[in-house]
Image (cartoon, rainbow, N blue to C red):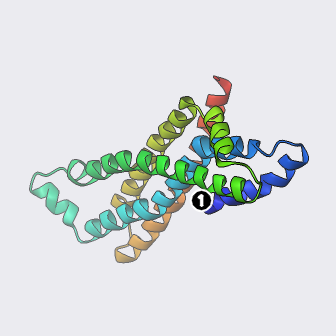
Amino acid sequence: MCIRDRIMAFQAAPQLESMGAPVYVASLVGLSMAREFGPIMTAILLAGRSGSAMAAELGTMKVQEELDALRTMGIDPERYLILPKILALTWVQPALTLMSTFLGIAGGAVIGTMYMGLSLDAYMQRTLLAVGVWDLMSGIAKSVMFSFVIGFIGSYCGVTITGGASGVGRATTRAVVLSILTIVVSDAIFTALATIFG
């Protein structure tokens, strides 16, 4: 996560320096991490890691008829297998988003202090002025929404596979692709609504 923000700070630095405002790198990195990059990049990583794992696990269980065995024993597979995974994603995604945001701001601070000659104190003051509680809360709200997207799509792709064992691979790929696409589209909608309503 930090590398991407170092790249963003590197790209923004010459333009901001030419306008005599290099201290705004702190605002740029802080706001972009809190509102957009922290939640969306964390969600994409979790879609690739956890969404695919959910689809593969549930798909394998369906192929081996373990889901039918649970239903025969009177155990609801959705409640027993899927709900705990979605709840775990809902707890982990906001925490990872906050960690990603703070690591991204730290990466921007490294560039601001070492490359642009800003003092760490000035960089952090500018970041604290630019990034408010609303910015962090909007990022956390997005991350919760993304966790539901990842969980539901991974689960759906896993329990609806066809084609036996070869279908597990296709379901896993489909879960990742659909999750990332839905994350990007829902992020665009969420951002548009947040902009419209202030």
- From this viewpoint, which residue is outermost toward the top? 197
Residue identified by numbered label 1? 2
Residue closest to the eye, 69 or 37: 37
The x and y percentages for residue 115 are: 75, 59
Residue closest to the eye, 35 or 163: 35
**Can residue 161 be spotted in the picture?**
no
| Quadrant location of the N terminus in the rendered image | bottom right
Q: Secondary structure at mark 1?
A: helix
- From this viewpoint, which residue is outermost toward the left? 73
Residue occupying the point 10% across, 51% down? 74
For the residue marked with disc 1, what is the amino acid?
Cys
The x and y percentages for residue 63 are: 28, 70
Residue closest to the eye, 28 or 94: 28
- Up the image or down, 65 lies above or below 30; here it is below
Q: Is residue 13 left or right of residue 58?
A: right
Residue closest to the eye, 89 or 53: 89
**Can residue 151 be spotted in the picture?**
yes
